[in-house]
């Protein structure tokens, strides 16, 4: 999986902590395990950077998927769907996935961050930094994003 935009700090973390010694700043060709480690980096910065890394990997997956035939993509979907747990119906999930693929092919890369901007505040609870969310507003914004 080709992941672009790895920072020097992320590359150093991957080399020093995760022991992915080939990791460098810029574009990297990650194995699935290395991409997962990259997505899960927590101690380097904050949760917003971690989700940014996750979006980079998801974009790389989408880019790679565009080079697959529809038959190959359906085989992948059939393998992955049983591993997903969601309150969405199978049909709704497939509709969101198909919409995402067509948006991606069309040059759009719609993204939505939870918590959305201006819907959270930082607090310190029991000595830990946490985000206090407006769950109702975030739920509403996510539904608007998924079902325009």
Image (cartoon, helix red, strand yellow):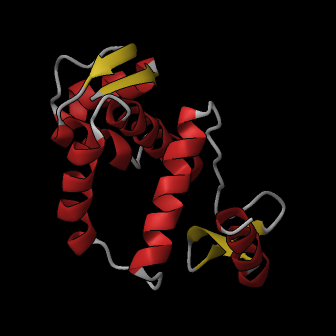
Residue 95, position as x, y percentages in the image: 50, 65
In this rendering, position of residue 3 left or right of residue 115: left
Q: Is residue 122 above or below residue 60?
A: below
* Quarter residue 35 falls in: top left
Q: Is residue 102 above or below residue 106?
A: below
* Quarter residue 22 falls in: top left
Which residue shows up at 27% across the image and 37% down it?
Answer: 69
Pick whichever, 138 or 75, lies toward us: 75
Residue 50, position as x, y percentages in the image: 48, 46
Which residue shows up at 33% across the image and 79% down it?
Answer: 85
In this rendering, position of residue 43 left or right of residue 141: left
* Quarter residue 99 falls in: bottom right
Pick whichever, 12 or 65, lies toward us: 65
Q: Is residue 144 above or below residue 89?
A: above
Pick whichever, 100 or 50, lies toward us: 100
- Work out whether residue 6 can be spotted: yes
Residue 2, position as x, y percentages in the image: 32, 23
Task: Name the quadrant of the C terminus.
Answer: bottom right
Pick whichever, 143 or 147, lies toward us: 147
Which residue shows up at 26% across the image and 54% down it?
Answer: 74
Which residue shows up at 56% across the image and 80% down it?
Answer: 126
* Count of marks, rendered view: 0
- Work out whether residue 49 can be spotted: no
Task: Name the quadrant of the N terminus.
Answer: top left
């Amino acid at each position: 999986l080709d992941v672009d935009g790895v920072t020097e700090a992320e590359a150093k973390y991957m080399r020093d902590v995760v022991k992915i010694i080939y990791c460098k700043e810029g574009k990297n060709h990650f194995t699935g395990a290395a991409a997962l480690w990259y997505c899960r980096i927590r101690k380097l910065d904050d949760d917003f950077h971690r989700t940014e890394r996750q979006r980079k990997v998801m974009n790389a997956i989408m880019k790679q998927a565009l080079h697959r035939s529809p038959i190959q993509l359906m085989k992948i979907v059939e393998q992955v769907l049983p591993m997903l747990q969601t309150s969405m119906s199978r049909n709704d999930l497939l509709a969101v996935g198909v919409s995402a693929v067509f948006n991606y092919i069309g040059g759009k890369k719609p993204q939505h961050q939870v918590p959305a901007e201006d819907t959270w505040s930082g607090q310190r609870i029991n000595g830990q930094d946490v985000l206090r969310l407006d769950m109702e507003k975030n739920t509403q914004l996510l539904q608007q994003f998924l079902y325009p």
